[in-house]
Amino acid sequence: MTDSTSLNRRRLLQGAGAVLLLSVSRAGMAAGGHVVAIRIWPSSTYSRLTIESNIPLKYKQFALSNPDRVVVDIENIQLNRTLNGVGNLVRQDDPYIKNARVGQFDASTVRLVLELKQNVSPKTFTLAPVAGIKNRLVLDLYPVKQPQDDDPLLALLEDYNQGELERSQPAAAPLPGKAGKDRPIVIMIDPGHGGEDSGAVGKHKTREKDVVLKIGRRLKALIDKHPNMRAYMTRNEDVFIPLKVRVAKARKQRADLFVSIHADAFTSRAARGSSVFALSTKGATSTAARYLAQTQNESDLIGGVSMSGDRYLDHTMFDMVQSLTINDSLKFGKEVLSRMGKVNHLHKRSVDQAGFAVLKAPDIPSILVETAFISNIEEERKLRTAHFQQQVAESIFAGIKAYFANGASLSPHK
């Protein structure tokens, strides 16, 4: 995959929205600033502030109290119009940031001050350029006080940031007992991308991350209405979640199935149709599957993760169990694909395979559904409609029910 292909495919910052993206004007650049964009992504899990620059940024971060503030001193830059606009990006519903302001602290240092709504644990790191995005300084604000709900996401993110995600994982995902009789069938729904990672963007500025979240919510509603099923989501808002944390959440919730939902793009707008993919540990089954896995696995680089979680990323677990799980994934994928074919053209009539990082739960049958090509103008139009979103959700749900009706094994290693 060439750099130009990746750049054209992603076009990540197009359509990011005036509220969350403030681009530098020619006048601002002429004033000497190197910062070209600031974005703030609030969510209930954590809030992220990203400063994008045409040079690598050096920083010092510390905290102040009365009132509680996080302060970041950024070296070797000057104030410009982009930096001065940071206060306008703070939303009233941000759970963590009350307001933001900047000042020229000394001749070569800009000071960014975030006044907080609650006590936070800040995590600051830098990212190298990727997929058309320049150098980034990232500040993530996590709550110190754990939420009172049953969602393990925040704890998993903390483990991931400390490089200890593997430690928090259960030995095996499936619960004892027969799903649907002794206990509910648990489905993990994974709307792709989120936050800084918009995914693919259509000609009419439709963002993949928004469409797949809507489909995911519709699928969850269908599953939760079933008396013997329960659905969880890797994300239920516009937030970036690393790929391996998505897998870890499915295992923590002891999911029986994992469904990742996408609406991808291709270099040609003529490409169209729905596809279903499963994991391959022995190479991709087609050039298209290999290309798609490469672009989807970019998500961590685009969304932005520090390197502290890499210990889990490279860990290979339960090879024999995973090979059995892949066989179940193919059966599950076939059921979903046949039903997707009733609501949309199929890009390929068999389940394709490649090394998708998000499908690597060793003991949970997992598929990735490409609902349609957002780069195709007609399919982009369909993806924007509630009718097609509901059709896709119903097709996936029908595939889930058929998979279990055909006597699916919930525990391939038993």
Image (spheres, rainbow, N blue to C red):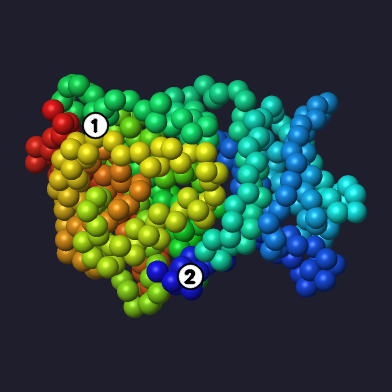
Residue 147 pos. (x, y %): 54, 25
Q: What's the amino acid at mark 2?
A: Asp
Q: What's the amino acid at mark 1?
A: Ile
Q: Which mark is residue 3?
A: 2
Q: Which mark is residue 185?
A: 1
Q: CA distance from mark 2 to mark 1?
A: 42 Å
Q: Quadrant of residue 128?
A: bottom right
* Secondary structure under the numbered disc 2 in the rendered image: helix
Residue 74 pos. (x, y %): 77, 49
Q: Dot 2, crowdedness within 10 Å: few (<14), some or many (≥20)? A: few
Q: Residue at x 43, y 32 (%)?
A: 165
Residue 145 pos. (x, y %): 60, 23
Q: Residue at x 26, y 27 (%)?
A: 172
* Secondary structure under the numbered disc 1 in the rendered image: strand
Tell me which numbered mark, 2 or 1, is placed earlier along the sequence: 2
**Does residue 271 sit above or below 295 in this rendering?**
below
Residue 19 pos. (x, y %): 67, 56
Q: Is residue 162 left or right of residue 56?
A: left
Any part of residue 203 in sight: no
Q: Is residue 31 left or right of residue 88?
A: right
Q: Which mark is residue 160?
A: none
Looking at this rendering, what residue extends furthest in the right direction?
107
Location of the N terminus by quadrant is: bottom left
